[in-house]
Image (cartoon, coloured by chain):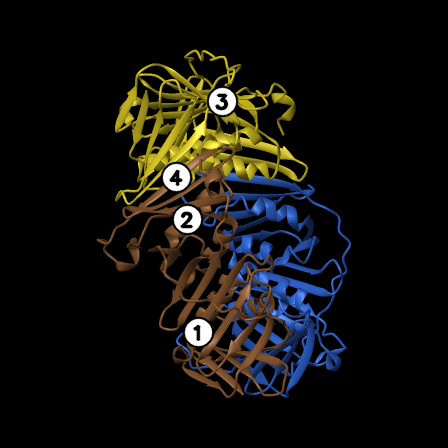
Chain colours: A brown, B blue, C yellow
Amino acid sequence: MLELRLVQGSLLKKVLESIKELVTDANFDCSATGFSLQAMDSSHVALVALLLRAEGFEHYRCDRNLSMGMNLNNVSKMLRCAGNDDIITIKADDGTDTVTFMFESPNQDKIADFEMKLMDIDSEHLGIPDAEYQAIVRMPSAEFARICKDLSSIGDTVIISVTKEGVKFSTAGDIGTANIVCRQNKTVDKPEQATIIEMQEPVSLTFALRYLNSFTKATPLSETVTISLSSELPVVVEYKIAEMGYVRFYLAPKIEDEEMNP
Amino acid sequence: MLELRLVQGSLLKKVLESIKELVTDANFDCSATGFSLQAMDSSHVALVALLLRAEGFEHYRCDRNLSMGMNLNNVSKMLRCAGNDDIITIKADDGTDTVTFMFESPNQDKIADFEMKLMDIDSEHLGIPDAEYQAIVRMPSAEFARICKDLSSIGDTVIISVTKEGVKFSTAGDIGTANIVCRQNKTVDKPEQATIIEMQEPVSLTFALRYLNSFTKATPLSETVTISLSSELPVVVEYKIAEMGYVRFYLAPKIEDEEMNP
Amino acid sequence: MLELRLVQGSLLKKVLESIKELVTDANFDCSATGFSLQAMDSSHVALVALLLRAEGFEHYRCDRNLSMGMNLNNVSKMLRCAGNDDIITIKADDGTDTVTFMFESPNQDKIADFEMKLMDIDSEHLGIPDAEYQAIVRMPSAEFARICKDLSSIGDTVIISVTKEGVKFSTAGDIGTANIVCRQNKTVDKPEQATIIEMQEPVSLTFALRYLNSFTKATPLSETVTISLSSELPVVVEYKIAEMGYVRFYLAPKIEDEEMNP
């Protein structure tokens, strides 16, 4: 039997909104330690990894490991029916092929339950080795989202270049070229507004803006985003979920890097 | 001669927005007692009844009964040109086939008049007998609108079931099933947030969500909605218009009730 | 060499938004005295004239007169990437065929530069003689925009009639007729809310609402608009840009004036 009660239900709504553009169907894996998901996007280019640790739930009961296949668009439709202040409980009985989402309004006046059939989804679980990254950039998530959106109006790919002084985002397209430089800045009023660069060596990699823009759907989950870069490794774009876990997106760099450089 | 002056002009704007999705052409009936409308929707399934009592107008002059046929979409286009604080006057001279809407800004700096040709519309006036209802639910109108909208993302019809404890809205569709229960609750901070159930006997009826969703266009007119239910009678969904009257929607239940029950 | 630094960068964003619906490609002319543009709309019916005086820039360097042909849609795409608080610098080196827009965030943490190729655009500069107008109306720009939008839902053309008492906007269409009268009013709380009429003689002219609606895209530039009217002269619709200049739109009246009068 599975019963997971999350007081801050809006968080689950945001998680779904952050990944449903990229992934159509996926298995949610429940174990004693947490609720997780790993899935490739439909074009098999990007990888999404979600973790919500058991400790973050008000109540977490998972008697045995369970993999629940769901259409994320349908889950999103159901979660949209939850109010932003609702408590959400996910339930599944042993031996059934359905999952139930229960939404309770804060004053308990309104209780909704939504039942959905589970799907069988083939998926191999990729092991993602811990890696050392040449450069790790932490910056305000809204700033990163704005930059990806702005550059998309000019070009299709972005070159992300990190030096000690800052991180540069460059693109080129039919109408011209664009460079946006964010300087390292630790002396801000609020720590979440800082741009912090940890660098072993300079790195410059090219990515498809289309995917980065999809990743930024996770912006409401966290005020900061961490971008980890190394040559010949997929970039990791991570949005931490306060005290619970994270949504991480992986994307391989494009190889035609130098040719693209404007 | 007809001359009706309504200080709170935004109210007339809201009335039009609330019924124009359902009804295309209709007769507005003016008599010494008030301004009213009764019309079937274009598919002849739902009925709308509007009443604005004479006392609610700042000035109300109606020398003889008058039935003015109008295209509601055109009336809505004209009323949208009225500012939210404007005073609206409806005028019609005897023997003409036009109606004039006059909008005055609060400081009288801007005065607009819109003249529209009247139409001949055949319509029989249905007598709606006063009925005893098995159950009457009064609840926040925004809550009712939210529930109808949420359930529409899952199914096409809703079963409304009333017991002493509360009212349950259920639907089923391809992606799953949904139940939303609103408990009776009289102890709220503001009376318009209460959910109050007056019940003679339990009742459970099925309705097309499409029509209920149209009815909820009247939500801006009132903070509460009253839903009156009886087996074998059309449901009445009523939005009171403060100190003036009401907009009421009538809709017959679907007969395939039991089969739909998930 | 050209280098123009504008602290209030949002102003340049608004200028582009105000004219790009009307004009596709245009030459921006820079001289020692200012930054200007004059262009016909694509159907050669309306004329736009923009002036930003040198004194309005924090830094203004223009070594020799320069005419820079740009696609306004592309410029707008680039300017949309500037934050509303950004400082914008326009740069062009001698002998190159590109222009660079540089955006600096207020705290200098983020610096973006967008480079765009210039185009060769044929354009004769029309001399616009100073004229005496029969009537000049100054009114709140939002009011004028609202009136043009409202009347567009009824008809295609508007008759603007000025008398000492006020200005009347009239239209007629399939669904009826509309008249909106704004009375002269100088005794308002804020001077920008006044409607002021300077009239030599009454005037009544007909214009295509489609163009007036395009002109009102400039509404964010100024709280007031000035409309200068004379028989047999194009109307001038002017939005002043505080301490810097103006955007002016010119439109010839329609000749079938009397026939249209409802």
Residue bearing the label numbered 2: A146
Work out whether residue C49 or residue B72 is closer to the camera in this orientation and state it: C49
For badge 4, the amino acid type reads Asn
Q: Where is residue A162 shown, x and y percent of the image? A: 34, 48
Residue bearing the label numbered 3: C119
Q: State whether residue A176 is above or below residue B132.
A: above
Residue at image x 59%, y 55%?
B17
The CA span between labels 2 and 4 is: 13 Å
Secondary structure of the residue carrying numbered label 3: loop
Q: Which dot, 2 or 4, sits closer to the camera? A: 4
Label 2: chain letter: A
Q: Residue A179 carries which label?
A: 4
Label 1: chain letter: A
Q: Residue A52 carries which label?
A: 1
Secondary structure of the residue carrying numbered label 2: helix
Label 4: chain letter: A
Residue B50, quarter of the rendered image? bottom right
